[in-house]
Image: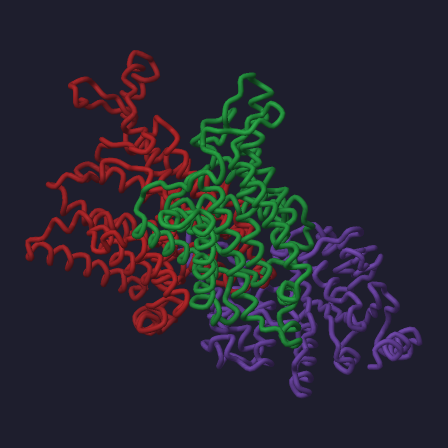
Chain colours: A green, B red, C purple
Amino acid sequence: MLPIVWGKEPKLEFFFQYLVAGITYGTIYAIVAIGFNIIYNATGIINFAQGEFVMLGGMTAVTLNQFLPLPLAILGAVVITMIVGAVIEIVFIRWLHKPSVLRMVIITIGISILIRETALHIWGESVRALPYFTGSSTSSINLGGVYISSQILWVVGVGALAVAALSGFFNLTMLGRQMRACSANRDAARLCGIDAGNMVTLSFVLSAAIGAIGGAVVCPITYVQYDSGTPLAIKGFTVAILGGLGNSTAAVGAGMILGILESFSIWVLPTAYKEAISIAILLLILFVKPSGLFGSAEAARLKEF
Amino acid sequence: MARRYSMVAAFAGLIVAIQLATHFMDASYHLTQLTMTAYYSLLIIGLCMLIGYAGQISLGHAGFFAIGGYVSAFLTTHNLSSYKGGAFASFLKKSGALVGRPDIYGGELLTVHPLLACVAAILLTVLIAYLIGGPVLKLKGHYLAMATLGFGIIIYRIPLGTTFLGAADGISDVPGFPLAPGVVISGASSLRVPNYYLAWGLVILGMALLLNLVQSRVGRALAALHGAEDAAGAMGIPTARYKLNTFVLSAVFASLAGVFLTHYNGGIGPSEASVMKSVRYVAIVAIGGMANLWGALLMSLVLNYLSLRGYFGTYDDTVFGAILILIMLFAPDGLLRRHLFTDLKRLVSREPADEEAP
Amino acid sequence: MTLLSVREVSKRFGGLQAIDDLSFDVAQGSIKALIGPNGAGKTTLFNLISGSLEPDRGEIVFGGAAVHDLSPDRIASRGMVRTFQHIRLFPKMTVLENIMVGRHVHSRAGFLAGMLNLPFTWKEERRIREKSLEILDLLGIAEHARTEASSLAYGQQRVVEIGRALACEPKLLLLDEPAAGLNMRETNDMGRLIEKIRDMGVTVLLVEHDMSLVMKISDEIVVLSYGQKIAEDRPLSIQKNPEVIRVYLGDDGC
């Protein structure tokens, strides 16, 4: 299901097509990774249900699009997913006192199963997709000899916008600064009058929002199904680790690396092993340099609980 | 000494009672699911050793189950009759390493003997477990969970993308497994009762081995490293090696379960390797009380049986997901551990502790 | 005779030189104390000696062999055993079981022997148990053998931790602030216990803040400041050393 319109000239042409496909997927992986990072920074939790936010965004947008115009459907999907994120935090996370890592891992895995199974009961096993935002699935734009489908520009553009908006939020707004204060030192932040509990809820809401946006933009290309969350979560996690947990700027670069590597792996290996490739990369990083390509070992040690 | 095994005897009694009950209620078809439950239980108690006693989570144990199942399924169904003329093949056939049987078209099917296939499966499992476990067990917390999950997904993807492993269809027509003369692991309905006892006999044997281990010097060292890893190392316990050995041990239990169940079912499919299976096993260990072999075994008996009989309907995975959340939210030490079980266990096997010596 | 020798050891964390070219020896059969103001590098040094950390430079020689590149468990099995500043008993285990873990390096039943419950393990277990009970007697806490270790009073937990280390039959016992959190009577008892351990033939190296304890029991004292050794002498001379007085009174006001 490559989002590629095959060009006429082989070799170099192919190379660019693969590159573009890699960047598209890389953007999505980066978006999932940033979702991981937002929650991780606020709580120290890895939310194993992160991929489910992406799935929910796509699925809900497809359903709403049946009776709403596309922009409204996407907006609705994002809002609904944000509500789901808030509910998860309030029901399952908020009232636990210093839960162990193992406990949080298992709880978020349980949540991801519940969301996936609920999606299965609502939407069934069928594969769905939104229409292309502009143009159609067969039309393409010629960028210096490389034919690119317009949706790819949407994915990359929205991804870039989301990253910019988030970094603006964390650096420029009061609320964003409060969240960062919380993640740096929760007790100190509380002493300054910041409600740490609400910041955690907010982190789930933000994380759900960015996941849902990603899910909606990408689903015209990749399609969406009740169980498409888990593979995305694994790859998003790979990217988050590759960039260094908690470091969202590096996650963008790491997303591109993984997306492109994965895309080119199809050149040499059967498509069926594509997922195994990115997981093998994950294992390799975990074994060799768990602090990530851009992170320092000491920073990683500080973050480990 | 005798007291250590009194629970084992009681459990054996339960197994007999269940069989008698199905016999008199004329419901012996339940034994099929109960036998399958037994093999899953073999995996569960091994995983319980790893998670509960050594304190290391694995979200990829269905992978080891699948390695066992697929290796033995492939070797016992892959037709080698085209090599029949070769000297090596005929030597193997004479020595019993290869066995012939008629295929469905009346031709001859020459395959590896199930026992040899089983040995190969276990050897491969040990190899992979050592290779993976070495680096993986250096990780902690989220990293360990994700790494084992990743391992599980890779193993899941391999049969799915490999035609000679049957891709999405899996491998079928796997023959029975003659463990000893007159003892065959097979799903034939005429062998239902002996297979039920055989399966649970294997579980009880595995249980006895693990109970011994828990009560031994190694068990004490594992409890120590689970409780305070740095202090255990400071007492001279080679923590990395002990964790790795436990990982390999639990992988072998999982792999054996895969081998046996594949012969019993006559086949294996990729769903056995899925992440959801791994998660389910962790859920059962968690609800059994983590560091509680008996709890894990009993919960495995109940939940696997209910699931295999289809009592959870289309909510099968939902049930296990919900169990995981509820247990971790409200009783992270497990259901059975919280209540009657610890006291019961102490009553039966712990006191007086001096009787541990022969 | 020298049992432990720290030779020109350095350790750096990022911008902080935690240990700077440090050397000293510990004589067999002695009690040696490491003191110094907070942040002087005492805990880092302890972690270097016991193998939790590896030095950037220099070597640590124990019983004639370099041990600074060995893992903590290998070092322990060679006869150098430590306790922890924040007591690290094994939770959910009784006092007796905690001590029995200490016998690990002196027993050998492995995974297979344990699973098969081989006869030799029965004898071994009995010996482990007997030896552990002996140690509890020695420490005067035999009546707590079946108590869960974490439910004991703090002072007694310290004694159990030392007992667990003694169960390893160490040549050198490393005590990380053995009197931390103890009241005055318990501290005195601790002092007597440490002397008793020395008289049993076990060499002791300890880090301690309680000066009266250190001055009373130590044969020799090393004073650290900012990762460097500023003095090494007998207690009486250390008390009169102007450099030591400056470091303690000037920086800490203690």
Look at 55% across and 73% down and name the residue there. C135
Query: Furthest-top residue in view?
Result: B85
Q: Position of residue B40 (x, y in %)?
A: 29, 49
Q: How many marks?
A: 0
- In the picture provided, is A80 more to the left or to the right than B142? left
The residue positioned 85% from the left and 74% from the top of the image is: C234
Q: In which quadrant will I find the N terminus of chain C?
A: bottom right
- Foreground of the two, B145 or A237: A237
Quadrant placement of the C terminus of chain C: bottom right
The relative height of residue B340 versus residue B126 in the rendered view (above or below) is below
> Is A174 left or right of B272, judged from the image as shown?
right
Name the one closer to the observer, B67 or C132.
B67
Examine the rendered structure and indicate whether residue B345 appears above or below residue B242. Answer: below
Residue at the extreme bottom: C185
Vertical side of B41 occupied by B115: above or below: above
Q: Is residue A264 left or right of residue C115?
A: right
Residue B248 in view, yes or no: yes
Q: Is residue C114 above or below residue A125?
A: below
Query: Residue B83, image x and y in percent?
Result: 31, 15
Q: Position of residue A227 (x, y in %)?
A: 38, 46
- Residue at the far right: name it: C242
Q: Nearer the viewer, residue C247 or C136?
A: C247
Q: Quadrant of residue A239?
A: top right
Is residue C109 visible from the viewing direction of this image?
no
> Residue A186 location in percent, x, y?
62, 70
